[in-house]
Image (tube, rainbow, N blue to C red):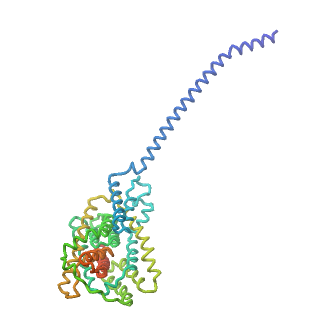
Amino acid sequence: MKKVILIFGVLSLLVFIRPVFGMNASSANVQTTTTVAQMEDETSESFFAEAVNGIKQFYSFTGFANAQSGNILMIFIGIVFIYLGIKFDYEPLLLIPIGTGVILGNIPFVAGYQTGIYETGSVLNYLYFGVVKGVYPPLIFLGIGAMTDFSSLIANPKLMLLGAAAQIGVFGTFLGALYLGFSLPEAGAIGIIGGADGPTAIFLSSKLANGINILPDGTTVKNLIGPIAIAAYSYMALVPVIQPPIMKLLTTKKERLIRMKPPRAVTQKEKMIFPVVALLLTTFISPSALPLLGMLFFGNLLKESGRTERLADTARTKLIDIVTILLGVTVGASTQADIFITKDSLMIFGLGAISFVIATMGGLLFAKFMNLFLKGEDKLNPLIGAAGVSAVPDSARVVHAEGIKADPHNYLLMHAMAPNVAGVIGSAIAAGIILSFLG
């Protein structure tokens, strides 16, 4: 009986407390369900917030978020360069790499992520080393020397005077830059734009206006390599646009009809001797121009020696093509908007245009002056004086085209090549003289 009462009592107790446990379990389940729902809501909100923040962060690193009006302007200029090179064939080997470089240099990015050409450690920065240290220009001159035939200059040495006369644009621009407030080294670097020689302009600006040199008053010279290089190459490319109006303005139709006697035949021995003699003569006059002139005449010696055709072929094809690509892209990429779009850049472009006009006029007028002392078949067609600028061979081609317009049977190309290659030598000598005084 006691056992029955005990079992009954236990059962009664279990029955009594079951609702309590049941109620508590149900409550706990409700609370647990509520807590899970809240956690799911919070997790969903947290995930959404993180997603939004991630998208915002991603956008902050894109070019759309960091673009400035200057970047857009420079990208447009880069596209124009490419368009001119493709559509009008204006120095496409230069303008297309430079235009692409301008676009690359102005893609907006967050500073410090090793993308731009001025960012330490970036690939573009390493490639730009060849510009800053003046490595590329002598290699370009090596290729030019291996491509150039100096026969027309050897046959008629007096035409070298036309190349020298065109260098008045260099010294005229130098004085103009001083007048506008540039320091002596900066003005010297800007002045060489008047020679219409891109590699020489880069070489000189890398020595004088590189943003590193210190002036006597303690200030640092400005880094003008980008604006100077772009100006020099731009005006080289625009030779067919700039020169013809000046040529027509300063010459009469009678003068444009002058026919020059064919140049004499030049022997192979003369061609081989010329680079050695010219190297010694020019570098003794202007030792500072040795990196340029030395490589120019070395390349020509490879071409004319008859024993190093493989080396000459490499210099005038693969090597110069590689260097032209690297030079064009890195010079273009150095035109980042915040550095390039300045008052100084605008003044440099203005001076460059004026200097190119002065250089063209100098060659034309000096040819007319020489004609005062020449008679008969020795007289010069003044048009060839315009080829005294060192935009090889475009300037000579423009002279030839203008001569054909006046007389379809008057071929001036070979005559124009003499002052044209003389202009290359002259601009390098001028750069050496400037460097020796201001370097």
Residue 245 lies left or right of residue 49; in this view the side is: left
Q: Is residue 333 visible?
A: no
Front-most of residues 289 and 168: 168
Q: Residue at x 42, y 73 (%)?
A: 320
The residue at the far front in this view is 408
Front-most of residues 396 and 205: 396
Quadrant, the C terminus:
bottom left
Residue 315 lies left or right of residue 219; in this view the side is: right
Q: Quadrant of residue 25?
A: top right
Task: Name the spot of residue 392 as percent of width and height, x first.
Answer: 33, 75
The residue at the far top in this view is 1
Q: Is residue 256 visible?
A: yes
Task: Name the spot of residue 344 as percent of width and height, x first.
Answer: 27, 61
Q: Residue at x 27, y 80 (%)?
A: 409
Front-most of residues 126 and 219: 126
Q: Quadrant of residue 116?
A: bottom left
Task: Name the spot of residue 382 as percent of width and height, x first.
Answer: 22, 79
Up-down: is 259 above or below 182? below
Task: Name the spot of residue 431 as percent of width and height, x first.
Answer: 30, 75
Quadrant, the N terminus:
top right
